[in-house]
């Protein structure tokens, strides 16, 4: 069941949730994204990533023909609802949190970041020493 009609009719500014790590790309395609600098563990659900969406700004983007189809294509800082939020909340939502994935950051930025993280492992005597980029 979709909650979109309830959220839209009541002018809900923020919708918070949490997802398992492997579902982050799917939720980003639904215009939700991770936001906190840390994730958490639940005995019932395991490792969870808190996420948030700003439904009114998503609707406004659609109406203005700037569809936020993927998290990276839609900059919330341009949204009216986002700009009306308290500064402390804006700061909390300004980043993508501790999660990185192509659906949130775009393929090029994601792979560039991953390549940078793997650099130390390519040094002589390390796990990936001597391997080509393809390998």
Image: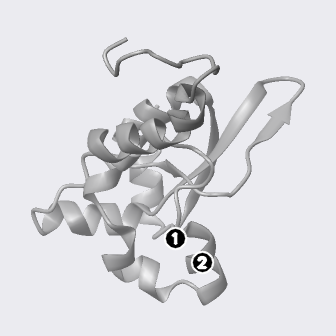
Where does label 1 land, which residue? 94
- At numbered mark 2, what does the secondary structure look like: helix, strand or loop? helix
Check the image and name the residue furthest to the top.
135
User: How many marks do you count on the picture?
Assistant: 2
Q: Residue at x 31, y 15 (%)?
A: 134
Q: Is residue 2 visible?
A: no
Q: Quadrant of residue 22?
A: top right
Name above or below for residue 88 compared with residue 110.
below
**Percent of width and height locating residue 79:** 34, 76
Where does label 2 land, which residue? 91
Q: Residue at x 43, y 15 (%)?
A: 131
Q: Residue at x 53, y 19 (%)?
A: 129
Query: Is 134 or 47 nearer to us in this picture?
Result: 134
Q: 4 left or right of 43?
A: left
- Mark 1 touching mark 2, by CB under 8 A? yes
Check the image and name the residue furthest to the front.
124
Other-residue count near label 1 (Cα within 10 Å), few / some / many at <14 / 14–19 / ≥20: some
Quadrant of the frame with the C terminus = top left
Check the image and name the residue furthest to the left.
65
- At numbered mark 1, what does the secondary structure look like: helix, strand or loop? loop
**Percent of width and height locating residue 20:** 63, 28
Q: 67 left or right of 131?
A: left
Q: 85 left or right of 69?
A: right
**Percent of width and height locating residue 53:** 48, 57
Q: Residue at x 54, y 83 (%)?
A: 85
**Percent of width and height locating residue 30:** 37, 41
């Amino acid at each position: 069941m979709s909650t979109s009609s309830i959220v839209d009719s009541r002018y809900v500014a923020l919708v918070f949730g949490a997802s398992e790590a492997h579902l982050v790309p799917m939720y980003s395609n639904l215009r939700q994204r991770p936001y906190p600098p840390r994730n958490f563990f639940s005995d019932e659900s395991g490792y969870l990533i808190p996420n948030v969406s700003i439904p009114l700004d998503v609707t406004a983007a659609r109406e203005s023909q700037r569809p936020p189809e993927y998290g990276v294509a839609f900059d919330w800082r341009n949204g009216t609802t986002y700009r009306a939020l308290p500064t402390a909340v804006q700061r909390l939502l300004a980043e993508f949190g501790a999660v990185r994935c192509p659906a949130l950051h775009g393929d090029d930025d994601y792979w560039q970041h991953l390549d940078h993280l793997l650099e130390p492992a390519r040094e002589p005597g390390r796990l990936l020493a001597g391997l080509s980029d393809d390998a």
